[in-house]
């Protein structure tokens, strides 16, 4: 059993996902992962873990759409059938809610995707350089 195989088994998935969702380094959990709203740093400022290997691409956007859609669609149906508000009021409330929830979730889901990739040694995260 090589040293890389031992190291690969030591990376737990759920702590890495939680750290990524908090937008922290998946390795140490204290360094900021993001350099801005969605830009991932090349290295962690605390533990110097390389984060440049990530390939988040469109995954966080798809997850955001999935979550916001699955939360807002039932709420829209329930509020329309129970309260029957004016269409413009309903649209305004749900438009603001969708935008706010999307802006909140997008960087956190990107961090979780990077944490998942780090924990599973994807895209060069486990390669010795």
Image (tube, rainbow, N blue to C red):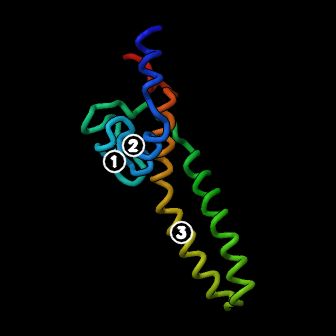
Nearest the viewer among 127 and 21 is 21
On the rendered structure, is 84 left or right of 10?
A: right
Q: Position of residue 73 (x, y in %)?
A: 69, 69
Determine the secondary structure under disc 1: loop
Disc 3 target residue: 99
The quadrant of the image that shows the C terminus is top left
Q: Which is nearer the N-term, disc 3 or disc 2?
A: 2
How many other residues sit within 10 Å of disc 2, few (<14), some (14-19) or many (≥20)?
many
Asked if the residue at tag 1 contacts the one at tag 2, i.e. Cβ–Cβ closer than 8 Å, the answer is yes
Which mark identifies residue 35?
1
Which mark identifies residue 40?
2
Q: Position of residue 57 (x, y in %)?
A: 54, 42
How many other residues sit within 10 Å of disc 1, few (<14), some (14-19) or many (≥20)?
few
On the rendered structure, is 99 left or right of 37?
A: right
How many other residues sit within 10 Å of disc 3, few (<14), some (14-19) or many (≥20)?
few
Q: How many numbered circles does the render carry? A: 3
Nearest the viewer among 5 and 111 is 5
Nearest the viewer among 78 and 126 is 78
Marks 3 and 2, how far apart at CA = 22 Å
Q: Residue at x 64, y 81 (%)?
A: 91
Q: Residue at x 50, y 58 (%)?
A: 105
Marks 3 and 1, how far apart at CA = 22 Å
Q: Position of residue 121 (x, y in %)?
A: 49, 26
Nearest the viewer among 13 and 72 is 13
On the rendered structure, is 30 left or right of 74?
A: left
Determine the secondary structure under disc 2: loop
Considering only vertical position in the picture, is 101 above or below 61? below
Determine the secondary structure under disc 3: helix
Q: Residue at x 50, y 55 (%)?
A: 106
Q: Which is nearer the N-term, disc 2 or disc 1?
A: 1
Considering only vertical position in the picture, is 80 above or below 35? below
């Amino acid at each position: 059993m090589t040293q890389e195989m031992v190291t690969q088994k030591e990376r737990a998935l759920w702590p890495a996902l939680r750290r990524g969702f908090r937008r922290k380094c998946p390795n140490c959990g204290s360094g900021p992962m993001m350099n801005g709203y969605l830009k991932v740093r090349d290295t962690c400022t605390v533990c110097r873990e390389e984060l440049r290997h990530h390939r988040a691409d469109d995954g966080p956007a798809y997850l955001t759409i999935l979550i916001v859609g699955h939360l807002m669609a039932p709420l829209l149906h329930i509020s329309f059938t129970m309260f029957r508000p004016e269409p413009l009021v309903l649209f305004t409330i749900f438009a603001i809610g969708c935008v706010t929830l999307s802006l909140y979730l997008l960087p956190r889901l990107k961090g979780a995707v990077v944490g998942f990739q780090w924990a599973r040694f994807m895209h060069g995260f486990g390669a010795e350089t």
